[in-house]
Amino acid sequence: MKSTTEKKCQIHGMVEPGFESIKQLYEHNMQTTEENSQLCVYYQGDKVVDLWASTTEDDNFSPDSIINIFSSGKSLEAIAMASLVSKGLLSYDAKITQYWPEFGANGKEELTVADLMRHEAGLANFDTSLEMEDLFTESIKKNNVGRIIESQAQIYASPDGSKRQYHALTRGWIANEVFRRVDPTGRTIGEFLREDISNPLKADTIIGVKKHEISQISEVTPLGFGTQFLESLKPKFLGRVTPHNIAQIIGSIIKLVPSIYKKVKAGNPPVFSGITGIGFINTPSFTMGETPSANTFSSARGLAKIAAMMSAGGKWEGTEYLSEQAWKAMHENPVKADMGGLTITRFTQGGIDSFTTCTPDSTHSERALNQGREGFYGWMGFGGSIFQWHPELDIGFSFVPTTLHALDFLNERGKRYQTEILNCIAKISKQKKS
């Protein structure tokens, strides 16, 4: 990543009146924390922020470039499952075996759809590595992944009895198997997303990239751990490019040590056969596979439009994407629980987190996750992406960067925009009342 003195950056796009401070913040952040990024926000059905920029002189980077948003895709798989609820084909309270009898092998017969969506299935890791090709749409339909899932047994590793453990990759694989068994035409989540969400909304959001779409991808670049540690030693006024100082980073890592130790002790095999390091995330074989929980490609424009549809109750421009009942069910019954020692989450039965106002006894990590994004629903992705919506204020929000800040565990870098959006809307509301 270039130093702040070397960066050349032209900000493209627009902000509507009342949101000028968002552009100022974006300009500042592009000079300090980003290489390429997109930011798009809808408010009450109107696009009020649409910004993109590159500091790498990448002429191919545009507002229509698609970027891996990693776990932000979890909210799209949640929308896919909610669509089945909308059609009366799925219930969150139902046991998964009602739709997939073979899933119940090895003691999994009592698991419900809600357990899975809340990251409480006890299946965060598999005892078998997958081949990249297993996740191609045609391989999924041959049950290549389904057979592996059927053979798994549950493992709950939390010492305090909590069942919640982040199913970083596996929730999407399991949900995809449920979805294709329930969908009347046997589609995968990737196929559903194209046909029922992305194409009608004209949103560039894809699970399972086709060969002819690979040229649209803007590759992600991990910010090295060494760079992040060195930057964290700097005070903010010297242009630190990371949102956290060294003490905050070390504190977060210490919290993760127990769960990392348990994984090592358990001897879990690598997720994919023959893969080491993080470089595989930019390979065609990975991008073309369906891992809804961690391998969705989208532009911020595409995500923000879908988020706007969700903030409006599942409807957009006269078309109903989710019934009122299904939309409500997706957002209902948030359960507060510790997510593997990292932070407290409040996942609903539909599989999205509910960001809430903190209380005096809230932990530091709870505040880091929630403060500044109160009232939003959704989730976020490894390294920085955010895809969330705010039903009460009717906000659809998306931030998509290409630079991955792996140690920004709770995506506070992008949360700055959410906080400022809420500030702008509060000022606009106050002006309307005066």
Image (spheres, rainbow, N blue to C red):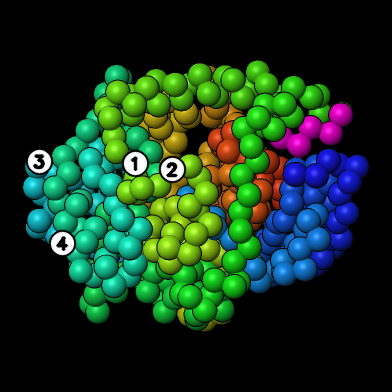
Location of mark 4 (residue): 99
Q: Which is nearer the N-term, disc 2 or disc 3?
A: 3
In percent of width and height, residue 246 lies at 67, 21
The disc placed on residue 107 is 3
The front one of 358 and 142 is 142
The amino acid beneath tag 3 is Gly
The secondary element bearing badge 1 is classed as loop
Location of mark 2 (residue): 276
Labels 1 and 2 touching (C-beta < 8 A) = yes
In percent of width and height, residue 146 lies at 20, 58
Residue 242 belongs to the span the image colors magenta: yes
Q: Residue furthest front?
A: 274
In percent of width and height, residue 421 lies at 72, 51
The front one of 378 and 63 is 63
| Magenta span of residues | 238-243
The reply, left or right, for residue 47 in relation to residue 153 is right
Residue 296 versus residue 212 in the image, above or below: above
Q: Which is nearer the N-term, disc 3 or disc 4?
A: 4
The amino acid beneath tag 1 is Pro
Say few, some or many: other residues with alpha carbon within 10 Å of mark 4 (under 14 / 14 to 19 / 20 or more): some
Residue 56 versus residue 166 in the image, above or below: below
The secondary structure making up most of the magenta span is loop
Disc 3 from disc 4: Cα separation: 16 Å
The secondary element bearing badge 3 is classed as helix
What residue is drawn where x is 63% and y is 22%? 248
Location of mark 1 (residue): 270
